[in-house]
Image: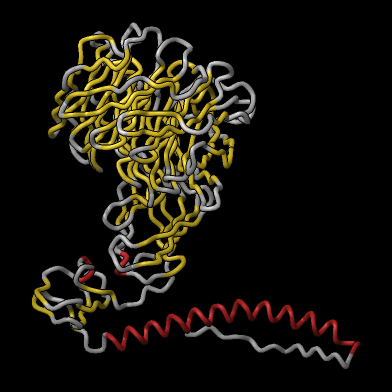
Amino acid sequence: MVATIDPITADPNSGDPQTFEAQADLAWDQLRTRIEQMNAQAEDIAALAADVEADAASAAAAKWVSGSYTEGDIAWSPTDYCNYRCKTTGSRTIDPASDPTNWRLLTKTGPGGADVTSSAVDITMSATSGRLQNIAMTASGKKTTLPSATTIDEGSPVFVFVNTGQYRYAVHRYGGAFLFYVNPGQTVAAMCSDNSTGAGTWHVSGQGVDQVYSGNSAEVINANDSRYIAVAMLTSTKAICCFRNTGVSSYLYAVIINYGSASGTQTAINAEASSDISVAAQASNQATVVYKISTGATKGYVLDISGNNITPGAVATIDTATGGSGTALTALSSTQLLCLYQGSSANTPKERVLDISGSAITASAEVAADATNCAGGYMRVGKVSSTKALVCFRNNTGNKIQARLQSVSVSTPAPTGSVRDFSLMPGTSPVLSFGLAILSATRALVVTGIDRTYGDIMAVLLDISGTSPVILRYQALRVGGVTSIELNVVKLNDNTAYVSWLGGGSLGADGLMLRITSDDNIVPLPIADKLESSVEVSNGYLDIVALDSTHIMQVCRNSSTYLSAKTIELAA
């Protein structure tokens, strides 16, 4: 029955000043009541219209049975009793409710219904599930999976989730991709704007919605104390990690880490104590690793990769100077990399182009990337193009970050323009690791820990379109730090980066996404904490790499001091 609307009895008459005010107040009160009634009636009419449309479409519909159907045929599903139209002619052996590829839902799924669920197992929703989902999970690590978007109508909101329990749960798209978490006491609405595919295009509304998924299990790679961890992406499902195996004479080791399948076995690369390790992949089957030895000399290897097997080429001595620390590496092309290092203690940052031929490294002549003395092993380098890179390092007096663009002509690097001093970093800058992400040919993002009187971390957006970097914006953030912050940042796309750090209140690895708007604002998304628990705070104990725009490979020295890898999923 359609909701009724009460008549308005008030009659305010401007010609009768004695009664006008009272009648106007009464009319307003009656109108407010009738607004609610009109809204209810509109919903009822919409529901009736949907019923009429569905009834008209299904007037001659028969129950689905396995067999041949012609494009346009209508059948109702024996599992959810909804009507479906066949998309193409052919044999149809799967219930339409479970076959969105070949059937299109006709039954209108207008807003309505509420499900109250207490569950210790994962929940799979259907198109007929209540639009309000009051869920109380009684176990941790559980998820709710949305129905195929092809079986529901587009709209806002399609589903509203309320967590009435004490465990958070994840909501995933049809097909498995993570969408968001619902924390205890939280309410989150999910809206669908495109139902042309099963996964659909979803939008999320709520306060502090966590869209970083930490539910994948960590894979422990070895049983050795592992430090100076460095990781590089090979493909969207594979990364290479290089590290110092402190449990085996501090030698340089490497391992292939896979997403979706078991990782490889660690491989010894050299037989000398190694530190300050950096790795970059110049191809999907080849990477280069550079490192320091105890004297401060810089060395490197080309690593050829086949499946999970790693074969090092001959060792190359890149620089023989003693006393320096720190390295950084970026691939400019499939045959060329730019290597940054400190040549000797408290000296200027040096760089060389590394030309790769087969499995051999040929280093160019040494060039000073800048004339400012640098602070130890805290440096980064990122590719802007095959002939341009950005170098960042901490200066040796005050530890503020310096940025200098570099050009590469054939095999000769050279600094361009002038150095940019991050002079507005507040207070006393800590001597800690920082991150650099090249977002595009015109923008770069630097993220660093800062003096905790003023914040925990600071994001600095740079214009790198010219020959000298220009600072566009500083933004200090509180991320729940309880001690010094060691961090890194990686690009997800031209307008999004992911930051991961140690030193937060979770006492493990935490992270968040940063959105960079087209008008150069920095927008932090909610923090995701304890992505790995109980990780000691130290430089070289955590590294990350983006496999694609929604997957991060996080590698760390875990609570047992062993090498541990976990894939972090991000909502698109």
Q: Is residue 506 rendered to the left or right of residue 54?
A: right
Vertically, is 68 above or below 278?
below
Task: Return the x and y of residue 364 as percentages of the image width and height.
Answer: 30, 23
Residue drawn where x is 11% and y is 70% of the image: 93
Residue 482 image offset from top left, x and y in percent: 54, 25
Q: Quadrant of residue 19?
A: bottom right
Q: Residue furthest bottom?
A: 15
Q: Residue at x 77, y 81 (%)?
A: 26
Q: Position of residue 317 (x, y in %)?
A: 26, 15
Rendered residue at 54%/48% (across/down): 520
Task: Between residue 474 and residue 336, name the one nearer to us.
Answer: 336
Q: Quadrant of residue 490?
A: top left
Query: From the viewer's perspective, is residue 59 above or below residue 90?
Result: below
Q: Position of residue 381 (x, y in %)?
A: 40, 30
Residue shown at 39% from the left, 39% from the top: 384
Residue 236, visible in the rendered structure: yes
Asked whether residue 541 is in view, the answer is: no
Does residue 337 appear to the left or right of 21 in the view shown? Answer: left
Q: Quadrant of residue 213?
A: top left
Q: Nearer the viewer, residue 166 or 469?
A: 469
| Colour theme | secondary structure
Q: Residue furthest right?
A: 18
- Give the answer, above or below, for where 117 lies relative to 251: below
